[in-house]
Amino acid sequence: MTPNPQNERVKRRYLAYLKEAKQLADQTLDGVARALSLFERHTKRKDFRAFHIQQAINFKTDLATQRSARTGIPRSVSSRHTILLALREFYRWLAGQPGYKSRIAYTDAAYFSLSLKEARVAKARREPPTPTIEQVRHVIQMMPAVTDIERRNRALIAFTLLTGARVGATASLRLKHVDLVEGKIIQDAREVSTKFSKSFPTYFFPIGNDILAIFVEWVRYLRVEKLLGHNDPLFPASRVGLGRDQQFEVQGLASDGWSDGAPVRQIFRDAFQRAGLTYCNPHSVRRTLVLLGEQLCHTPEEFKSWSQNLGHEEVLTTFRSYGVVSDRRQADIIRGLGR
């Protein structure tokens, strides 16, 4: 469909507002833009000023019958909730803008809501897949380490278990950010892609000397045998070139790093599949480390240090985001109290 120029202008203003005033991340802005696009497609690009509450009601009905473009299955309740929430916030903002105040009321935005029953389902807590330390160690042990690419992939998963670094940081770290003497990495927001652009040191978690040795060997291999410098990536990207059969193939390590965290997730996916385990994404290892910290830390100061090591300024962030007791652990505790 031909874009509506007036709609495009006001969407641009709204996304700028979310980025500059609300300081939302680009990934969040992409989700908002997709929600607005879905609604415009439903209304056939009608001007936002021509909004009527029946449009919102009809859109909710249509959304419930749609299938995900990525998976092909019907949209989940949580997916619909996210889309409608983005539209609700947009129309609340729009109701206060010049040229829209007289046409849209603040209460109109409330029509972009699920039923109370569906909203409870969408917000229900689900225990995310979280690997145990033993499972991650098994994954690492099952990984080959003959070629440069295989050694890099094994070291990457070992590094994630040692530090709990997010995929963006892992992809952007350089050798100069690693201090093997102090046993830490420096997540410098000026050069490393950290959440909320925070800078902080991360000391290697006490996972075991076997995991630490894999990562230390990798760093020394890059520095001594590959002769890489301080500004070279900690995990170089794969170099692709033409093979003898004139087909593109991986030919070792490239001189630059990854532009995003997608390759990190793919490495995890392939490694878990090779080990015969259900895939757990790199971020799930942070939950693994929180659960370990709950077992090892015996004082508030110890857990505060553990939390800071994950990049959390407040301990409550660790508890709220990662510290939910798993169903299995909950059962063990309750039965233990009974005994």
Image (spheres, rainbow, N blue to C red):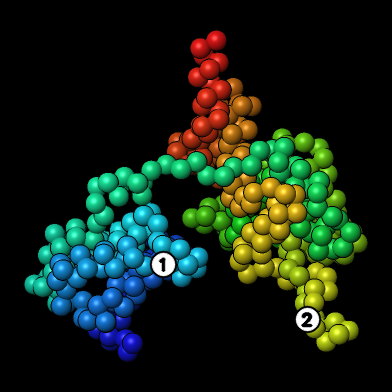
Badge 1: residue crowd in 10 Å (few <14, some 14–19, many ≥20): few
Q: Which mark is residue 248?
A: 2
Q: Quadrant of residue 14?
A: bottom left
Q: Which mark is residue 67?
A: 1
Q: Is residue 177 above or below residue 130?
A: below
Badge 2: residue crowd in 10 Å (few <14, some 14–19, many ≥20): few
Q: Label 1 amino acid?
A: Arg
Which numbered mark, 1 or 2, is in the foreground of this view?
1
Q: Is residue 61 left or right of residue 220?
A: left
Provide residue 265's location: percent of width, then percent of height: 64, 59
Residue at image x 64%, y 27%?
296
Q: Is residue 229 left or right of residue 171?
A: right
Residue at image x 36%, y 49%?
122
Q: Quadrant of residue 83?
A: bottom left
Q: Is residue 146 above or below residue 95?
A: above
Provide residue 130's location: percent of width, then percent of height: 59, 42
Residue at image x 51%, y 12%?
338
Q: Is residue 164 above or below residue 100?
A: above
From where the camera sits, is residue 159 visible?
A: no
Q: Label 2 amino acid?
A: Phe
